[in-house]
Amino acid sequence: MNAAASPDVLLSGAQPVLDVHDVTVAYHRKPVLWDIDLTLAEPTLAGIVGPNGAGKSTFIKAVLGLVPLASGQVRVFGQELAAVRKRIGYVPQRESVDWDFPVTVLDVVLMGTYGKLGWFRRPGSAERRWAHECLDRVGLADLAARQIGQLSGGQQQRTFLARALAQEAELYLMDEPMAGVDAATEQVVFGLLEELRQAGKTVLVVHHDLRTVVKYYETVIMLNMRLVATGPTDEVFTHENLRKTYGGRLAILDAAGEAVAAQERSA
Amino acid sequence: MTGWLAYNTAIVLAGTMLLGASCGLVGCFAVLRRRALLGDALAHAALPGVGVAFLLANERSMPVLLLGALVSGLLGVVIVAVLRFATRTKDDAAIGAVLGVASALGFVLIRVIQDRTTTGSKAGLASYILGKTAGMIAQDVYLMAAVSAGCLAIVWFFYKEFKAIAFDPGFAKVQGWPVLALDFLLTGLIAVAVVVGLPAVGGLLITALLIIPAVSARFWTDSLGRMLMLSTLLGGAIGACGTALSAQFSFSPAGPVIVLVGTAAFTGSMLLAPRRGLIARGLDEARFRRRLARQKLLRMLYELDEAAGGGPRPFELADVGVTIARIDAMARDGLATPVGAGRYLLTASGREQGARAARASRLWHLFLSEHADLAPSYADLDAERIDTILPDEMIRELESRLLADGSWPVELPPPAMEACR
């Protein structure tokens, strides 16, 4: 167990990394998340899957305190959210900000250090060096001085990732960090997730590509408004659970796949 | 007598300059956070407050009137927020409603006060609508100086925090910043800058002073710090120039003149700024289109030769639909050479460019069909950019496919396959 590597991890090992208890989130009367109970006892690399509108992003936002809970509570490292914010890293969806904002790539990554800097202190040379290092890890070292609007979609995604790395968190929540990136970038991103996991961090990732779930994640969280299933991917990521998560939508894909296969056989 | 005039002019100039500077500074955040219209609602909602304050205090004391303006302006902002959250009224409709109702209320109140009171003090009230710089006294300037210094100090101290909540409030909240409180502080700064400017520029037009310097500054720079500085300077210059002009031609109210000067600054920035300005972008666009058309032509000619097999063959201008001007430009660049009346031949470098354009186009088309899910975030029309946009591994994979099915342009050296395997 790599938990033995650091006394810090051992200390927090007594408390679950994430404890989501009976959480419901609703817009007016329409539930988006319904009675979610979920405990991640130990550091893991977890994929969150589910159809569009299943509440995957809302789940992450609920954990981060970005949406009000209609009921229930969230505890991180056994504590209230407010007490552990500096230990949490976040990668929002790329569309959540205005990419025409007048800041450089380095500026954005430096924002990851703001939490630890505290009030009024500006990032100095130590923070800059650290931000450059984080950019280097996502392969954007050369683009540090660019205005963020000049980046491609994949580069913008990696900028957000570098900002999260700069936070030096222990629990990372990422909202589709691989959306719209090419296979090579996806490898870079996944390599990073693995590194974080090896370093004893917990990483929760909203993931949209069902084909790669088994390859990437040791834990899977299957959501469709309610929690369908969660646990080790090899046990939980089953046809039965996929059908419960995706309902008819997966069946249509299945049927289309079978039709094509049949056609190819007869041809 | 001239000494007194000069002194008075200096007072007014200093006042409007300070006012323009503080509006320019805080206006940047209003614009970047897409809250520019909220400033407008605030300025209009301040008008009834001026009237009520006058009735309560029964005198035209500037601090009292401004306090009334500040309170009712902020009340207007609160009403916009309440309308939005409690009734699902959209932002623009909520702002429009508050703005309209508040101005009507303000106009009526001020009119009634002017009709009813007989003392000389009433005259100043109308200036809160369209602005009047002439009546400015030294004390007003001290107030504006204090407000400017305050705005500058607060933006300086909270620079990092304001930057964080303006760019990505969600992320800032996750980091533990009190986003709502910082938001209030920022709105408060905007409110103070607007309210102090009311008597000089007027409630109808003060938003222009908030928005114009900021959007003008944005054209010139991609850095927030520099945008703040530039917008502050520009705001100050606009205020001073507008006042000077309106004094020169004894034109009152001054508000419209100041805003027109701002409009000139904005128009100049919009047209002339390098990179983001309209002219720079238009030129860039035209250059890009010319390059695209040339790439396309070279590719077509190359592909005609390729299809016919063998070496380069001359082509007729009429057949390929090219204007004399364009082919002349290509001849100047050494891409084509005339070989008789209306007939041209591609040079070696023309053929090479054609082959490279063909390669890029074939790679792109293969990419689009092989990686349909990624296409929208990567596709780019410019043939010369494919190698900088797509990752090397993917280029190599696509190149080996081209080579395998025989569609690799023979003119080019074969791709470095050893790097692939």
Image (spheres, grey):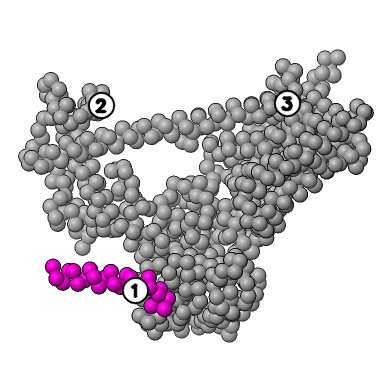
User: In percent of the image, x 73 and y 26: which residue is there?
Assistant: B254
Q: Which chain's residue wears label 2?
A: B
Q: CA distance from mark 2 to mark 3?
A: 53 Å
Q: Are marks 1 and 2 in contact (CB under 8 Å)?
A: no
Q: Position of residue A213 (x, y in %)?
A: 38, 73
- Residue B171 visible in the displayed image: yes
> Please, is residue A129 above or below residue B143 in the view?
below
Residue A155 within the segment the image draws in magenta: no
Q: Which mark is residue B36?
A: none
Q: Amino acid at mark 1?
A: Ala
Q: Which residue is mark 3?
A: B254
Residue A247 within the segment the image draws in magenta: yes
Q: CA distance from mark 1 to mark 3?
A: 70 Å
Q: Which residues are magenta?
A: A242-267
> Please, is residue A224 above or below residue B342 in the view?
below
Q: Do the dots labelled 2 and 3 sit on one chain?
A: yes
Q: Which residue is mark 2?
A: B326
Q: Quadrant of the C terminus of chain B?
A: bottom left
Q: Amino acid at mark 2?
A: Arg
Please tell me in which quadrant of the rendered image residue A88 appears: bottom right
Q: CA distance from mark 1 to mark 2?
A: 57 Å
Mark 1: which secondary structure? helix
For this rendering, which residue is in front, A223 or A126? A223
Q: Which residue is mark 1?
A: A251
Q: Earlier in the sequence, mark 2 or mark 3?
A: 3
Mark 3: which secondary structure? loop
Mark 2: which secondary structure? helix
User: In percent of the image, x 58 and y 76: which residue is there?
Assistant: A23
For this rendering, which residue is in front, B237 or A240? A240
Closer to viewer: mark 2 or mark 3 = 3
